[in-house]
Image (cartoon, rainbow, N blue to C red):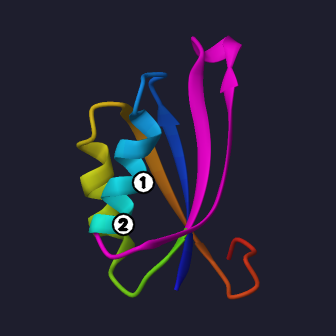
């Protein structure tokens, strides 16, 4: 199954590496990543990360919420064509 994670990260050195590491350690494979820094939001990074995996995505969400650079996480299920369901 494929999912899109909508993340808000504190701009810090290694923040994205910590998130990607957590994703892989929880059995998910990163497929695509996009993001930008938004000056209107105190420079926070708004990242969209597409992942695939067979495990429940809620497990990954709970673990990502514990990463101190991660301010929020939202999961969106994608159909096989990569479009939000």
Distance between mark 2 and mark 1 Cα atoms: 6 Å
Q: Examine the structure image and report whether residue 40 is included in the region drawn in magenta.
A: yes
Q: Residue sitting at 49 percent across and 22 percent down?
A: 11
Q: Secondary structure at mark 2?
A: helix
In this orientation, which residue lies closer to the viewer: 22 or 80?
Answer: 22
Number of numbered discs overlaid on the protein picture: 2
For the C terminus, give its image quadrant: bottom right
User: How far across and down, in percent of the image, does residue 62 sit?
Assistant: 26, 56
Q: Is disc 2 in contact with disc 1, using a CB cutoff of under 8 Å? A: yes
Q: In the figure, 38 relative to 52: above or below?
A: above
Q: Callout 1: few (<14), some (14-19), or many (20+) C-alpha neighbours within 10 Å?
A: some
User: How far across and down, in percent of the image, does residue 14 sit?
Assistant: 40, 33
Q: In the figure, 4 relative to 74: above or below?
A: below
**Which residue was labeled with disc 1?**
20
In this orientation, which residue lies closer to the viewer: 33 or 42?
Answer: 33
Q: Examine the structure image and report whether residue 79 is included in the region drawn in magenta.
A: no
Quick check: 51 left or right of 38? left
Q: Residue sitting at 32 percent across and 50 percent down?
A: 64
Q: Residue sitting at 42 percent across and 54 percent down?
A: 20
Q: Which mark, residue 82?
A: none
Quick check: 69 left or right of 80? left
Q: Secondary structure at mark 1?
A: helix
Q: Residue sitting at 58 percent across and 56 percent down?
A: 49
Q: Main secondary structure of the magenta part?
A: strand
User: How far across and down, in percent of the image, does residue 3 sit?
Assistant: 55, 71
Residue 43, image quadrant = top right
Q: Callout 2: few (<14), some (14-19), or many (20+) C-alpha neighbours within 10 Å?
A: some
**Which residue was labeled with disc 2?**
24
Q: Which residues are magenta?
A: 26-50
Q: In the figure, 7 relative to 59: above or below?
A: above
């Amino acid at each position: 199954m494929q999912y899109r994670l909508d993340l808000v990260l504190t701009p810090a050195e290694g923040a994205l590496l910590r998130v990607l590491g957590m994703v892989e350690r929880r059995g998910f494979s990163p497929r695509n990543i996009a993001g930008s820094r938004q000056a209107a939001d105190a420079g926070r990074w708004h990242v969209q990360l597409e992942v695939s995996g067979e495990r429940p995505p809620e497990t990954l969400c709970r673990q990502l919420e514990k990463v101190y650079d991660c301010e929020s996480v939202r999961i969106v299920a994608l159909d096989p064509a990569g479009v939000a369901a």
